[in-house]
Amino acid sequence: MTDCIFCRIAEGEISARVILETESVLAFHDLNPAAPHHALVIPRRHIATLDEAEPDDRSLLGDMMLAGAEVARQLGFAKKGYRTVLNCNHNGGQSVYHIHLHVLGGRNLSWPPG
């Protein structure tokens, strides 16, 4: 998807401050952080929304979650706690239609979020 910014980041066409790379996912710092630590974990393969994920994507979705935990450990906030968020569609707060996991930490995160 040449018009998808996250596909272009995954392909290396657009630079990002990469934290973690695996064969299936890429994690990088969010350009507009909502917390002192805010990373995004994306699959290298384009899936627009969680609603479009298929049963065969279970492993990939698991890779995203495990990468999120690794990001929290690497950035040093895993022990104190963090939040993972996957927004879906407009009313869910999704602004880029390439599935992505937010990993937020470095401060107390209130509930409900908003």
Image: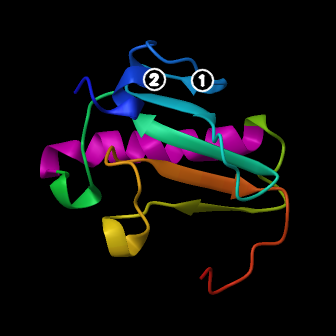
Q: Secondary structure at mark 2?
A: helix
Magenta residues, dominant SS class = helix
Magenta-highlighted residues: 54-73
Q: Is 68 part of what is drawn in magenta?
A: yes
Give yes or no for contact between labels 1 and 2 (Cβ–Cβ under 8 Å): yes
Residue in the picture at 39% in, 46% down: 62
Question: What residue did someone put label 1 on?
Answer: 16
Indicate the position of residue 43 as horizontal and vertical percent values: 37, 35
Indicate the position of residue 19 as horizontal and vertical percent values: 66, 27
- The one of 77 and 110 positioned closer to us in this rendering: 110
Residue 39 falls in which quadrant of the image?
A: top right
**2 relative position to 36: left or right:** left
Tell me the distance, in whole angstroms, between the alpha carbons under discs 1 and 2. 7 Å
Quadrant where the C terminus sits is bottom right
Residue in the picture at 56% in, 17% down: 15
User: Which numbered marker is on residue 47?
Assistant: none
Question: What residue did someone put label 2 on?
Answer: 9
Residue 70 falls in which quadrant of the image?
A: top right
The amino acid pointed to by label 1 is Ala
